[in-house]
Image: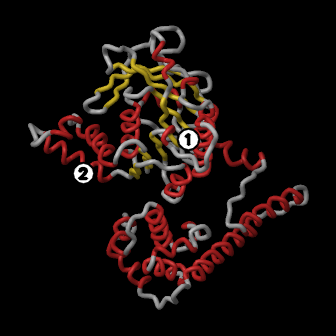
Amino acid sequence: MNDAERSVIGCLLMDSRELYKVYDTLKPDMFNEPLLREIYREIVRRYDIGQQINVVTIAQAVENETYTRVYIGQVLKDCALLPLASGQLKSYADSVVKDYKAEILRTMLTKTQVTASGVEQQITDLIQELEALKGSEKRKAKMLSGIVGEYQNGYFREKEEGKLQTGFPKLDDITGGLEGGDVIVIGARPAVGKSAFISQIILEMAKNGKRVGFYNLEMSEKQVYERLLSNQSGIGMTRIRRAMQFLGDEKERFERANKELEKLNILISSGAKSVSEIRNECRHQELDCIVIDYLQLVRADTKYQNRASEVGAVSKAIKALAMELNAPVIVLSQLNRTSEMKDTKEPTMSELRETGDIEQDASIVILLWNLDNEDRGRKGLKVDKNRQGELGRIVYRFDGNEMKFRETDEDIKDGGFRKAHTPTPFD
C-alpha cells in the first residue's frame, strides 16, 4: 500500500479533528488503494455529520463482500501504528494529491491523439483539462461534439436503470423518474399528508438500495422514526405512541420492521438548517436523493429585506445544491390559502407560499390536496409542472393511522387532465 495514503489514514485515526487542514484539497477518489479510498471516504462522511471516528466504527461501516471487518481492522491498526510525525498530515496529503495528478496527467497524455486537421481544438481542450487538473477540479465546459459522443448511444434502445423511482408506478410513469440536478417540489396545505407521502417515497428508495438524506426541519428524530416504523410495520401511529403492551402479532411486526429499518441507508437530520449547512453534511455522503421538509423552514445564509426574497434565495441555493451534487432534491412546500376558497379545493403552482422563484427553479412540481372534505383519506395529486415530460393527475387513498398512500384507478373528472399518463410517440 502507498505509504503516504496509509500515513494520512493514520493521522486521522489519531486525531480526526485535523481533517479540516486537508478537507478541501484531498478527495477520496485521489487514493490509489481501493480500501484506503473507502476508509477515507467514510472518515469524511462521519466528520461531516459529527459521528465518532475510530478503528471499530470505520471497520464496521466499510465492511463488505470484498473486505472482512477483521481485515479492515488490521489495515486500520497498521496505519495507526505507523511512526507518524506530529503535524505532518498536510504534507502526507500533498503527496497523495501529487501522485494522483501525476497519474491523471500520464493517462491524459497517452490518450491524446493529435491530428493536423483538429490540432487547434485539441490544444484548447488539453489546456483546459490541464488547468482543471492543476486546480484539482473537473473540467466544467465541454464542446457539443464531446457531449454528442458521450450521450448519443443511450437513446432508442432498452433503457438502463439510472433514473430514481418514487415507488408509485403511475407517478413514475408521468414523471419518467428523477434525475441528478432536478429539484422536485411537493406542495400542499397543512395536514394534507405531504410528510407521510415523502416518508413512503424515502422508504421505497432505500429498500431499492439507494442512499437518501432526509432533512426534516419540523419534526424530531423520534417523530420521523415513528412515521417510518408505522409505515413499515403496519401498526398504527396511535398504537406505537401510546400502547403499553403488544397485541396479537404486533411484537413480530414491530421487531421485523425495526430490523428492516436498520438495514436502510437513510441519513436523518432534524432542526433548522441553511442550505450551506445541508451542503456541508451531504457533499461527501454520495446520496442518491436529498429530501427537505420543508422549504419555508430552511434558513437563508444572509439577511434579506423581505421574506419573499429570502425564500427565493433559498430556492436558488437548493437548485445549485442539486446541480453540484448531481442528485435530485425533493423539497416540500406549504401552499397559501387560495385553494381553500375554491369549490374543488384544487391548488395551482401560483399558490406556493411566499415565493414565485420555486416555480422557475423546480423541474417538477407536484401538488396534493383533499378531494373530499368528508372523506379526508381521498387525496388528489397532480403533476403541475414537468420540464422533461407530461402532466397528469392521480387519485390516492391515504391511511392516516399507518401513514400509507395507495394509488387508485379513480379519475378526477373536469376535463383538465388525463386520468393518467398515456404513451406518446416520444416514449
Amino acid under label 1? Answer: Glu
- Label ID, residue 179: 1
Amino acid under label 2? Answer: Lys
| Cα distance in 3D space between marks 1 and 2 | 30 Å
SS for dot 2: helix
Mark 1 and mark 2 lie on one chain; the one further toward the N terminus is: 1
Depth check, front residue: 235 or 389: 235
Q: Residue furthest front?
A: 305
Callouts 1 and 2 close, C-beta under 8 Å: no
Q: Is residue 257 left or right of residue 272?
A: left
SS for dot 1: loop
- Label ID, residue 208: none
The quadrant of the picture occupied by the C terminus is top right
Report the label total: 2
Q: Position of residue 363 (x, y in %)?
A: 59, 34
Query: Residue visible at 63% across and 74% down?
Result: 97
How is this picture coloured? secondary structure
Depth check, front residue: 289 or 243: 243
Q: Position of residue 367 (x, y in %)?
A: 48, 25
Q: Position of residue 142 (x, y in %)?
A: 75, 51
- Label ID, residue 259: 2
Density class for disc 2 (Cα within 10 Å; few <14, some 14-19, many ≥20) is: few
Query: Residue visible at 51% across and 15% down?
Result: 418
Query: Residue visible at 57% across and 67% down?
Result: 27
The answer to whether residue 255 is above or below residue 189 is: below
Q: Position of residue 185 (x, y in %)?
A: 52, 34
The answer to whether residue 130 is above or below residue 365 is: below
